[in-house]
């Protein structure tokens, strides 16, 4: 994604910063998105500078870590596949957090069983709808 604008565009269509598990990766992705939105090239130098301006370069691992990231992914051609893996893992983490909340509230027994069930259904529906929105394809892409 760092070296290919089209790959970054694909990733931006699929992912949000909060989809990343590690805070450093969230910050890096967010900064890449900002560079893209500013219509600037997103490469190792511009990304490092963006992170430096935000005071975040060292907290994400510095220039050395960014350079390692460039070398870790063998090709930008598979970015869509990789992005869907990140998206899937993010959804699973969200579901685990949601189910943990439902379990905790069930043990606390502050609500009637039927109310708890309604609440659980609504929360899972909200998570499901969030997923549907992320699968949305702009009409412009469908027409072209």
Image: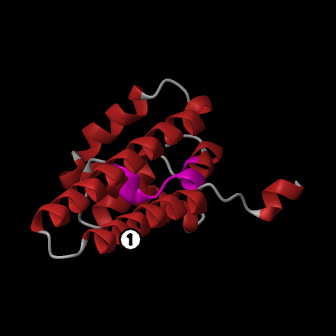
Q: From the viewer's side, name the closer residue of 135 and 18.
A: 135
Residue 40 visible in the snapshot:
no
- In the image, residue 122 lies in the stretch drawn in magenta: no
Which percent across, then down, holds residue 69?
36, 35
Q: Which residue is mark 1?
A: 118
Residue that appears at 45% across and 42% down:
88
Question: Quadrant of residue 49 in the image?
Answer: bottom left
Residue 107 sits in quarter: bottom left
Residue at left offset 22%, top offset 61%: 101
Q: Residues within 10 Å of mark 1 (few under 14, many from 20)?
A: few
- Locate residue 118, reporting x and y percent: 38, 71
Residue visible at 18% across and 66% down in the picture:
105
Picture coordinates of residue 103, whole percent (x, y) = 20, 57
Q: How many marks?
A: 1
From the viewer's perspective, tell me whether residue 113 is left or right of residue 81.
left
Rendered view: 126 above or below 137? below
Left or right of residue 105, residue 98 in this image: right
Residue 141 against residue 111 in the figure, above or below: above
Q: In percent of the image, x 71 and y 57: which residue is there?
A: 137
Part of the protein shown in magenta? 11-20
For the residue pair 67 and 138, the one nearer the viewer reads as 138
| Prevailing secondary structure of the magenta residues | helix
């Amino acid at each position: 994604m760092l070296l290919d604008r089209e790959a970054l565009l694909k990733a931006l269509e699929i992912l949000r910063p909060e989809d990343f598990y590690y805070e450093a990766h969230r910050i890096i992705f967010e900064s890449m998105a900002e560079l893209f939105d500013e219509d600037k090239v997103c490469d190792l130098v511009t990304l490092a500078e963006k992170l430096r301006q935000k005071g975040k370069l060292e907290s994400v691992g510095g220039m050395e870590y960014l350079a390692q990231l460039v070398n870790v992914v063998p090709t930008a051609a598979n970015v869509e596949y990789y992005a869907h893996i990140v998206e899937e893992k993010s959804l699973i983490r969200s579901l685990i957090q949601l189910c943990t909340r439902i379990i905790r509230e069930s043990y606390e027994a502050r609500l009637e069983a039927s109310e708890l069930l309604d609440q659980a259904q609504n929360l899972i529906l909200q998570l499901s709808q969030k997923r549907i929105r992320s699968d949305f394809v702009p009409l412009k892409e469908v027409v072209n």
